[in-house]
Image (cartoon, grey):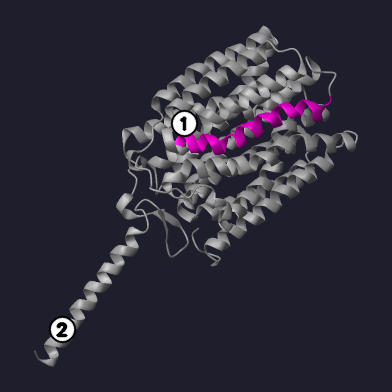
């Protein structure tokens, strides 16, 4: 054999060896695991690109929209209940004590995300959403006949929050399994239901409170939500591409990931102040001498701004990067609290604040879920999204009561509460910005 033939044979053997090494290394990673691109934007590999043009995918968005309209939408309207309780059933209690009902809603809802997400990854959405519908409607019916503080804590706080969690997490996680390229857009469309619910429920409940009384007003809302949630149960499904479970899930290994934990820390700080305006803007408006009716309109307008805030930023984030949008919108929401709410002394200025704040805070609610999905294996998406909300739950629990304590300590002055809410949101946005730089240190990278 000539020297040339020997060299050709040696080269062929090397190529075969390299090819085998590539196949071995590729087999180490599941085809559906997220792959981080050069610009730092995590996408699913092309071999498992999720279909986003099927009827099931669009029905899932519709069902999730209905589920969030009823659940998170009515949760956003807790300020309506708080204002009613302070002058009726619970008028002997201070605002901080009453706000524990709303904060407990948020905590149970957020904290339940971890176990619900784990069950979702194993069993899918339908069973969870059926149980959630039962818990949710039962909680509303029990709230309608409650008279004592502990009864509101159990029904509207614990049971309501659990029902919301059982409907919220399977719905949003299911949407994420159907979409890859336009995941944030799809999630934003679904989450817009919560903003629309936040517009409808304050106005509807306030009018019904005055016309048919608290009990029947609450029951009517429960019956309406029961029908809509039933439709959601029938329409929400997961993509078949996520049915194959991996041989070994990472489990709680995400707690060791710097990107995941820094996002959790930033989200916790944002959540600490994010819901304070939703809880107290009605009371603040009434303290300015604004009529009760217009005070509820202000809350409705805040939620109306949230409808657009959940959709428009989500669509933009698919183009400019999800972390690139989450950090600045959270920062601007905190800045609006410090500047706009602090100096809102008339109805017109308060309305401007409410609409703008609803828009920018809505971006946090809709975009944080796709951000978690972006740094997650698609087969663990339910658990990792749920665990993120479980971590955030503790700050969501104490945000409202701490704001109420600050309000009482300052003898009814809202300035301290406003500073608390605004600064925590700004601090959280800076940590989220840190996650962006951990993914890709380039300033203008699409992350």
Q: Quadrant of residue 175?
A: top left
> Of helix, strand and loop, which one carries label 2?
helix
Is disc 2 surrounded by few (<14), some (14 to 19) or many (20+) residues within 10 Å? few
Q: Is residue 409 left or right of residue 114?
A: right
Secondary structure mostly taken by the magenta-highlighted segment of the chain: helix
**Going 60% across and 53% down the picture, which residue do you hit?**
261
Vertical placement of residue 211 versus 356, above or below: above
Residue bearing the label numbered 2: 8
Q: Nearer the viewer, residue 350 or 357?
A: 357
Report how many numbered discs are placed on residues in the image: 2
Question: Can residue 68 be spotted in the picture?
Answer: no
Q: Is residue 104 left or right of residue 256?
A: right
Residue bearing the label numbered 1: 64
- Residue 159 highlighted magenta (yes or no): no
**Residue mark closest to the camera, 1 vs 2:** 2
**Where is residue 296 shown, x and y percent of the image?**
70, 25
- Residue 101 highlighted magenta (yes or no): yes
Vertical placement of residue 72 versus 445, above or below: above
**Where is residue 200 shown, x and y percent of the image?**
59, 24
Vertical placement of residue 84 versus 443, above or below: above
Question: Which stretch did the figure color magenta?
Answer: 94-120
């Amino acid at each position: 054999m000539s020297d040339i033939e020997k060299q050709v044979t040696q080269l062929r053997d090397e190529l075969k060896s390299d090819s085998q090494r590539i196949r071995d290394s590729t087999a180490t990673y599941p085809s559906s695991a997220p792959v981080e691109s050069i610009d730092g934007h995590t996408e699913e590999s092309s071999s498992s690109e999720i279909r986003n043009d099927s009827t099931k995918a669009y029905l899932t968005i519709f069902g999730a929209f209905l589920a969030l309209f009823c659940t998170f939408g009515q949760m956003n309207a807790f300020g309506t209940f708080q204002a009613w309780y302070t002058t009726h059933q619970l008028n002997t209690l201070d605002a901080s004590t009453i706000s524990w009902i709303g904060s407990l809603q948020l905590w149970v809802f957020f904290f339940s995300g971890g176990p619900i997400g784990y069950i979702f990854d194993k069993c899918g959405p339908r069973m969870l959403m059926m149980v959630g519908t039962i818990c949710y409607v039962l909680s509303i019916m029990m709230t309608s006949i409650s008279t004592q503080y502990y009864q509101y804590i159990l029904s509207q706080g614990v049971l309501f929050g659990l029902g919301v969690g059982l409907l919220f997490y399977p719905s949003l996680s299911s949407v994420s399994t159907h979409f890859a390229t336009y995941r944030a857009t799809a999630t934003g469309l679904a989450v817009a239901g919560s903003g629309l619910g936040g517009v409808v429920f304050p106005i509807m409940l306030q009018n019904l409170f005055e016309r048919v009384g608290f009990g029947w007003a609450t029951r009517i809302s429960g019956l309406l939500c029961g029908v809509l949630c039933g439709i959601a149960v029938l329409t929400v499904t997961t993509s078949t591409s996520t049915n194959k479970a991996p041989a070994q899930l990472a489990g709680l290994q995400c707690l060791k990931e710097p990107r995941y934990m820094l996002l959790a820390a930033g989200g916790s700080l944002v959540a600490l102040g994010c819901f304070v305006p939703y809880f107290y803007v009605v009371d603040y408006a009434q303290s300015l001498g604004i009529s009760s009716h217009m005070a509820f309109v202000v809350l409705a307008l805040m939620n109306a701004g949230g409808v657009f805030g959940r959709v428009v930023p989500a669509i933009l984030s698919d183009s400019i990067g999800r972390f690139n949008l989450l950090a600045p919108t959270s920062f601007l929401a905190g800045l609006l609290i410090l500047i706009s709410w602090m100096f809102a002394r008339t109805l017109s200025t308060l309305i401007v604040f409410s609409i703008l704040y609803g828009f920018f805070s809505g971006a946090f609610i809709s975009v944080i879920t796709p951000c978690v999905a972006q740094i997650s294996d698609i087969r663990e998406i339910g658990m990792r999204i749920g665990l993120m909300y479980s971590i955030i739950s503790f700050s969501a629990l104490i945000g409202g009561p701490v704001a109420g304590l600050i309000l009482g300590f300052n003898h009814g002055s809202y300035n301290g509460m406003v500073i608390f809410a605004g600064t925590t949101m700004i601090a959280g946005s800076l940590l989220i910005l840190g996650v962006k730089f951990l993914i890709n240190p380039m300033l203008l990278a699409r992350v």
